[in-house]
Amino acid sequence: MSSLDELDDREQRRYQRELAREEARAKLTATLTDPDSTPTTRQAAAVDSITADMVTRLTGPAPFELVGDLPESFTGRGSTIPKVRAQLIEFAKAHRGQWIKYLPSAGDPFKSPSSLALSARKGNAGFGPGFETAVRSKVLFVRYTGGAQ
């Protein structure tokens, strides 16, 4: 078989698939848009064979949907602030000007003390303005000095 014959065969198969899709769309549209008609046994069987997945493939996903509440906003690359770190921030604000030793824990397994210190100095990672950090012997120390709120 020559390459020209193969191309013709592929084109014919593609054409047959397009016809089958058009027939399926027509059946779906006719059955769903005419509520007064009583479907014949053949139509009922055709509708029963159409699944929700097929409808989605034929019509595409709905471009919109109702939602009850607005989801939480995503404010960065990482996830939310760990609870342990949020507790540290509140504790530091309650003990203004005092250095606090902060070690990694299961609740806040930060990558390295220096990376968290840099994030805190930039005002990221939940800290915000008014925090100072220092790293001594691979241990993070944090204090709140009362910057702008």
Image (cartoon, rainbow, N blue to C red):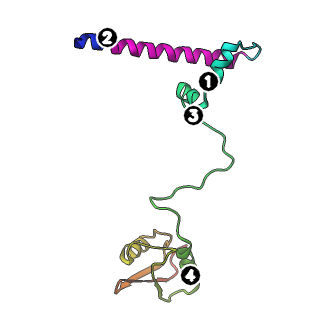
Mark 4 or 1: the one toward you: 1
Identity of the amino acid at label 2?
A: Asp
Q: Which residue is mark 1?
A: 49
Residue that mark 3 sits on: 63
Q: Report the magenta stretch's main SS.
A: helix
The amino acid type of the residue labelled 3 equals Pro
Q: Residues within 10 Å of mark 1 (few under 14, many from 20)?
A: few
In front here: 136 or 13?
13
Residue 80 pos. (x, y %): 53, 64
Span colored in magenta: 8-34
Which circle's residue, 4 or 1, is located before the other in the chain? Answer: 1
Crowd tier of the residue under label 3, counting other residues whose Cα lies within 10 Å: few below 14, some 14–19, many 20 or above: few
Classify residue 7 by image quadrant: top left
Decide: is 32 above or below 60. Answer: above
Spatial CA span between label 3 and label 2: 37 Å
Q: Are marks 3 and 2 in contact (CB under 8 Å)?
A: no
Which of disc 2 and disc 4 is earlier in sequence?
A: 2
Does 147 lie within the magenta span? Answer: no
Residue highlighted by disc 4: 93
For label 2, the residue is 8
In the rendered structure, are the residues bearing label 2 and label 1 in contact, judged by CB atoms less than 8 Å apart? no
* Dot placed on the residue nearer the N-terminal end, 3 or 4: 3
Question: In the shown orientation, is residue 33 left or right of residue 129?
Answer: right
State the residue in front, 40 or 99: 40
* Dot 2 or dot 1, earlier in sequence: 2
The local secondary structure at tag 2 comes to helix
Residue 51, image x and y in percent? 61, 28
Of residue 114 and residue 99, the one placed in the foreground of this image is 114
> Which mark is in front, 3 or 2?
2
Residue 149: image quadrant is bottom right
The first of marks 3 and 1 along the sequence is 1
